[in-house]
């Protein structure tokens, strides 16, 4: 019997960077579709709030403190998560940070913080989760959250762009190696989305000019990531691995 397309009910999904932004939204969305969601992040109080919201809406979630840059902590968190909700079926590898300043002013600390979280952290979580999927004989799905800045560049975010380009190449490398285990690895590459953190910037002259370079002439709305994420997480994307799905209003194909 064929598996239901887009069905994620009762699957255990780990979402890193789950205390705010995309991660918080992804956690709520996946729980709303019946998944058992483990949200992991460094900010415990914020995690509690998200888990409480999910519980109040009838979903199933738990929160775990996690620094994705520390391999031993990643292993511990995955063991904790599985002790409660059973084997992990999918991962949304979302934890990320940035440092905005010209490249000549970026110091070593900026580089280490961004690259360790965005690239090393994604590697450690993917590797640890894949090992558990193989042990548990789970046909898993790993979705790495990249960015269109991993495919093109913008000023003042060099470490971020470098880290996201690395995530895209890592996605392809892991997809090649892990297909034999039934593990799919894909990347979701968002463009510019409206959030509470960037609304002031996009009201500025520079921000408005940037929006005009998007063929759809607008920012993305966070719910517009739901369909692409569900495609990659669920059986609907069963023949997709090593793919990079851009959700950017056509920004990548805009004229130079």
Image (cartoon, rainbow, N blue to C red):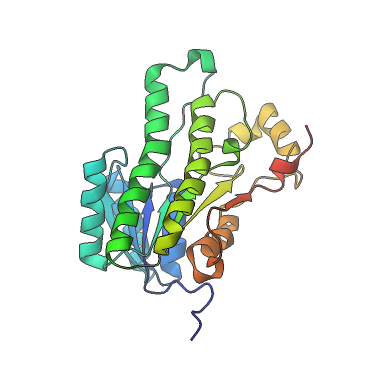
Residue farthest to the top, as pictured: 104
Residue at figure coordinates x 68%, y 27% from the top left = 206
Asked where in the image residue 210 lies, by quadrant, the reply is top right
Find residue 66 and report its horizontal and vertical position in percent.
27, 45
- Who is closer to the viewer here, 220 or 235? 235
Does 114 sit above or below residue 46? Answer: above
Nearer to us in this view, 205 or 111: 111
Indicate the quadrant where residue 69 lies.
top left
Residue 242 in view (yes/no): yes
Looking at the rendered structure, the number of numbered marks drawn on it comes to 0
Q: Quadrant of the C terminus?
A: top right
- Residue 213: percent from the left, percent from the top? 74, 37
Give percent across and percent down for residue 251.
70, 42
Residue 46 vertical placement versus 107 (above, below)? below
Relative side of 216 to 48, left or right: right
Locate residue 101, reporting x and y percent: 52, 20
User: Which residue is pictured at 47% across the width and 63% down the height?
Assistant: 29
* Residue plotted at (73% across, 31% down): 209
The single residue placed furthest to the bottom in the displayed view is: 1
Q: Residue at x 42, y 30 (%)?
A: 114
Q: Residue at the right extreme?
A: 255
Q: Is residue 71 above or below residue 87?
A: above
Q: Is residue 19 left or right of residue 237?
A: left
* Residue 228 located left or right of residue 212: left
Can I make out residue 199 in this image? Answer: no
Residue 179 higher or lower than 149, as above or below: below
The foreground one among 97 and 199 is: 97
């Amino acid at each position: 019997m064929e598996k239901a397309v887009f069905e994620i009910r009762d699957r255990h999904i780990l979402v890193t960077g789950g205390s705010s932004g995309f991660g918080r939204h992804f956690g709520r969305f996946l729980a709303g579709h019946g998944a058992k969601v483990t949200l992991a992040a460094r900010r415990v109080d914020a995690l509690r709030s998200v888990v409480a919201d999910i519980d109040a809406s009838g979903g199933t979630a738990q929160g775990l403190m996690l620094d994705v840059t520390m391999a031993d902590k990643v292993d511990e968190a995955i063991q904790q998560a599985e002790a409660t909700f059973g084997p992990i079926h999918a991962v949304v590898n979302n934890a990320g940070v940035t440092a905005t300043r010209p490249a000549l002013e970026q110091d070593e600390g900026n580089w280490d913080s961004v690259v360790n979280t965005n690239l090393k952290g994604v590697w450690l979580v993917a590797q640890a989760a894949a090992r558990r999927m193989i042990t548990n004989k789970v046909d898993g799905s790993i979705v790495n959250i990249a960015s269109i800045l991993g495919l093109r560049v913008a000023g003042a975010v060099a470490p971020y762009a470098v880290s996201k380009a690395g995530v895209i190449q890592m996605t392809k490398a892991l997809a090649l190696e892990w297909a034999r285990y039934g593990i799919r690895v894909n990347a979701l590459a968002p463009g510019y989305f409206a959030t509470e953190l960037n609304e002031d910037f996009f009201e500025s002259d520079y921000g408005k000019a940037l929006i005009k370079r998007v063929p759809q002439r607008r920012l993305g709305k966070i719910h517009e990531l739901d369909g692409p994420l569900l495609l990659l997480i669920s059986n609907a994307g069963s023949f997709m691995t090593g793919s990079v799905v851009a959700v950017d209003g056509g920004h990548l194909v805009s004229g130079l």
